[in-house]
Amino acid sequence: MSETRRSVAIHVPVLARVEGEGALDLRIEGGNITQLRLRIFEPPRFFEKFLEGRHYTEIPDLVARICGICPVAYQVTAAQALERLFNVELTPWARAMRRVFYCGEWIQSHSLHIHLLAAPDFFGCGNAIELARIAPDEVRRGLRLQALGNELMDLFGARSVHPVGVRIGGFHGAPAAARVRELREKLHAALPEAEALVRWAAAIPMPPDDQEFVSVAMRHAGDYAVELGDIGTSDGLRIGADEFDAHFAERHEPHSTALFSSYRGRPYLVGPLARLNLNHTHLPQGMRVLLAETGLALPSRNVFHSLLARAVEILLALHEALRLLADYRVPDSPWVEVTPRAGVATGCTEAPRGLLWHRYEMDAEGRVVNARIVPPTSQNQARIEEDLRLSLLTFGLDRPDDVLRLHCEKVIRNYDPCISCATHFLTLNVAR
């Protein structure tokens, strides 16, 4: 059958082994994509509603429950938004340790995604166990890095999953200097492994997939933006967190319970590649040399380079943690006093998957009147659909259904969406 006469309908009723519930519908008629929908049908979790009436002291621990992979991002974003409203000035110690805490999350989340979720796709493997048969040392290295990230999160959060260390005004406690010294030795020992990971990731053949898109990420005058900075775009916009609504819009689509985001009416990219595209000049000199050796040209228009971007950010996070912990001391107090006041608080940080934005309206007693949270996955959802369409056209529609399905999986997993926590998640029904 020629491509022009081929008609294919791919209905994926359940995206299994994902964090959340979603599906993919793809219809090809006469050689054209006539329907492509990434459906997220998981019922609303009402977290923003749960926050209403809650005291500001409860917010960091409540929002940490939104995500088991990136709880630090939710805690730090909420804390910084409220601290700005309450005119709280963190101590230099607390501000530095917030960034270290965040580095731990980047290391564990990126390591998990590279080795257990994304990389198997590029080696023709069905899962990480199959990948470990052909690349055992690389998978073990990835698991060690992930464990190190978890350990760094535990250092300041008292536990790595849903940590409880952050409070408005700083941290509840400060780790002992001896434990920090022990962890610094592990971080230092991990540097060669992270450098090897960058080279390994750069050597993985990526599909040629040149696309035009707008990168959106935080930018900071002096650092690779993680937890501090403004919102920037690759077409030149630079705004504060409180201006987010003036430039970015959310809308409902009938096929998804997650909101779709747009910038100037178009999808946009958030996440590690968007960050690297906008902030690579702030990488340490040695890392810029290493990146140049890989041959990656930035800014990249191939979203599959997100895997390499994650590897680069793991190495960056190790360097940053080592730098900030070099002169560690236990402070007199890990927090400063807070006096709540009424008003609207906004804040944003760079979660592992991309820009995370929070808005809180607070009353004079420090209780939430209403809350709004825009996570990176919903910001990327429209971009994923656009990427799927463009990537399939480049890949070729006149391919066997299983091959098309696997390519769709590869594209979706490449974004590390919060609904994805596994390597095989499409159950395929095909009607011709």
Image (cartoon, helix red, strand yellow):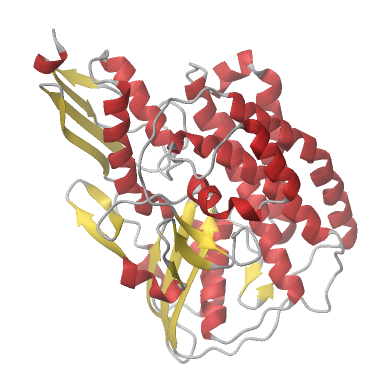
Q: Give coordinates of residue 215: x percent, y percent.
A: 43, 52
Q: Quadrant of the C terminus?
A: top left
Q: Is residue 281 above or below residue 127?
A: below
Q: Is residue 139 left or right of residue 174?
A: left
At x 50%, y 45%, the residue is: 299
At x 75%, y 50%, the residue is: 319
**Viewer can see residue 288:** yes
Viewer-side residue, 136 vs 69: 136
As drawn, the residue found furthest toward the top would be 1
Q: Give coordinates of residue 23: x percent, y percent.
A: 28, 36
Q: Is residue 391 above or below residue 150?
A: above
Viewer-side residue, 34 vs 256: 34
At x 59%, y 60%, the residue is: 225
Q: Quadrant of residue 417?
A: top left
Q: Give coordinates of residue 141: x percent, y percent.
A: 71, 30
Q: Quadrant of residue 80?
A: bottom right
Q: Quadrant of the N terminus?
A: top left
Q: Is residue 133 above or below residue 212?
A: above
Q: Is residue 238 left or right of residue 159?
A: left
At x 26%, y 16%, the residue is: 401
Q: Quadrant of residue 244?
A: bottom left
Q: Is residue 306 left or right of residue 94?
A: left
**Viewer can see residue 150:** no
Q: Is residue 64 above or below residue 141?
A: below
Q: Is residue 63 left or right of residue 143?
A: left
Q: Give coordinates of residue 330: x percent, y percent.
A: 85, 70
